[in-house]
Image: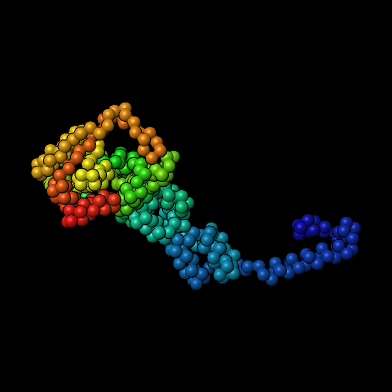
């Protein structure tokens, strides 16, 4: 606006162009503009010792020449360029950064180093996530971590942590607890490797007490997810564990060596898990018979259990409970046997009571029946 007005050197032309009133207003604006320019413009000023000390302090505080010129201009009311400060530094032989140091500073100035180190070491955030959060590059963050004497995670570990959805507790189980879990998995769960780092257990059940048993037991070892299936009253139970600590459950499908050569306490823990998952404890009122029965398709498993029980002075027997291809009606649906189905049974009162005293069952319904048999035996 001001430059367009100055072209009218002959003010008579300005008056003809805009009229006397507008010409007066325009001249008044020119006067005000010039007044403020002269009154408030920043005066040139030499860099005295105070200003130079301030500039040096700012430079050592990781400010660049452009930022220093702006700060000094506001603080001391002077006009100075970044080139003028640089030349004065050269003249006074004040140490300056190398080009690589300047580039390094420009890339890291906005980065909170302590926070980055805490997030990487304690919160286990990956370099990719940190780079995205702090608007930086993985290479820059990698250098910061190494310069602060922290170990950079290997690609395999970093990939594992970046894909981790739930924290899996690191638990060292004793041999009896492992044996119980193996019996439980063999009875009614499926174990498989979801990934190189995660073991997953899965099963479906309509028994509320068994569902609660799995939920309360397995949540101590990993993440448990339970949801409704398409079948009425049936729930699916998923549980994920750290493969390093629960990989032993992968061989729960064939636990024959555990049955044959383990300690008595480990075998009884395995048997308790098997009964909790796929066994029954009964009292037949008609003939007042005590019964413990274990169902399974794996005839080799039942034979191994039978042999071990016989070594402990029990007299179990095995019979076929269902043939392959047979069907039965259960909870409103038809179940077809894909394999021959067998049962191992104990029927002698003294043996059953002796065995129940040594079994640490956890299924609420099985515990009730266990206590019921003890009460009847006292009468």
> Going by the image, does 22 lie left or right of 266?
right
Report the residue at 32% width, 48% height from top.
210
Quarter of the image that includes the N terminus: bottom right
Q: Can residue 45 be seen in this view?
A: no
Q: Tell me, what colour scheme is on the image?
A: rainbow
Q: Is residue 77 above or below residue 196?
A: below
| Position of residue 261 measured from the top left corner of the image (x, y, whole percent) | 12, 41
Tally of numbered discs:
0
Point out the residue furthest to the top here.
325
Find residue 238 and report its horizontal and vertical position in percent.
36, 44
Front residue of this view, candidates 239 and 320: 320
Q: Is residue 208 left or right of residue 294?
A: right
Q: Where is residue 85 in the image (x, y as percent from the top left)?
A: 51, 62
How far across and down, in percent of the image, does residue 260 sit?
13, 39
Left or right of 4 in this view: 294 = left
Q: For the point 50% across and 72% down, which residue is it?
A: 50
Which residue is pictured at 37% across the width and 58% down the height? 118
* Closer to the camera in the image, 257 or 339: 339
Closer-to-camera residue (219/80):
219
Q: Which residue is located at x 15 percent, y 47 percent?
A: 349
Query: Looking at the picture, does residue 60 appear above or below residue 263?
Result: below
Which image quarter holds the C terminus? bottom left
Q: In which quarter of the image is residue 293?
A: top left
Answer left or right for 286 relative to 36: left
Q: Is residue 44 above or below residue 309?
A: below
Res. 126 visible in picture:
yes
**Residue 263 or 326: which is nearer the viewer?**
326
């Amino acid at each position: 606006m001001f430059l367009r007005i100055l072209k009218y050197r002959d003010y008579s032309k300005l008056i003809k162009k805009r009229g006397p009133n507008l010409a007066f207003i325009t001249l008044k604006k020119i006067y005000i503009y010039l007044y403020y320019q002269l009154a408030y413009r920043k005066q040139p000023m030499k860099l005295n010792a105070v200003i130079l000390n301030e500039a040096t302090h700012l430079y050592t505080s990781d400010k660049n020449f452009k930022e220093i010129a702006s700060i000094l201009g506001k603080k001391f009311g002077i006009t100075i360029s970044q080139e003028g400060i640089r030349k004065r530094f050269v003249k006074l032989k004040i140490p300056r950064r190398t080009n690589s140091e300047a580039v390094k500073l420009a890339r890291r100035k906005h980065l909170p180093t302590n926070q980055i180190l805490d997030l990487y070491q304690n919160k286990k955030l990956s370099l990719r996530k940190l780079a995205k959060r702090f608007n930086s590059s993985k290479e820059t963050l990698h250098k910061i971590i190494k310069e602060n004497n922290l170990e950079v995670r290997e690609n395999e570990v970093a990939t594992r942590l970046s894909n981790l959805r739930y924290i899996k507790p690191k638990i060292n189980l004793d041999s009896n607890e492992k044996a119980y879990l193996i019996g439980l998995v063999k009875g009614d769960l499926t174990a498989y490797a979801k990934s190189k780092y995660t073991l997953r257990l899965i099963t479906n059940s309509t028994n509320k007490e068994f569902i609660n048993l799995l939920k309360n037991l397995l949540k101590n070892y990993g993440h448990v997810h339970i949801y409704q299936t398409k079948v009425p009253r049936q729930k699916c139970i998923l549980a994920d564990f750290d493969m390093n600590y629960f990989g032993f459950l992968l061989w729960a499908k064939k636990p024959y060596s555990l049955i044959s050569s383990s300690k008595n306490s480990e075998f009884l823990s395995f048997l308790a898990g098997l009964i909790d998952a796929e066994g029954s404890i009964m009292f037949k009122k008609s003939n007042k018979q005590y019964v413990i029965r274990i169902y399974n398709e794996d005839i080799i498993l039942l034979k191994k259990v039978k042999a071990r029980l016989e070594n402990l002075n029990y007299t179990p027997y095995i019979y076929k409970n269902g043939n392959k291809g047979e069907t039965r009606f259960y909870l409103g649906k038809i179940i077809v046997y894909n394999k021959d189905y067998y049962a191992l049974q104990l029927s002698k009162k003294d043996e059953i009571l002796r065995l129940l005293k040594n079994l640490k069952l956890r299924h609420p319904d099985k515990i009730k029946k266990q206590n019921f048999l003890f009460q009847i035996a006292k009468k």
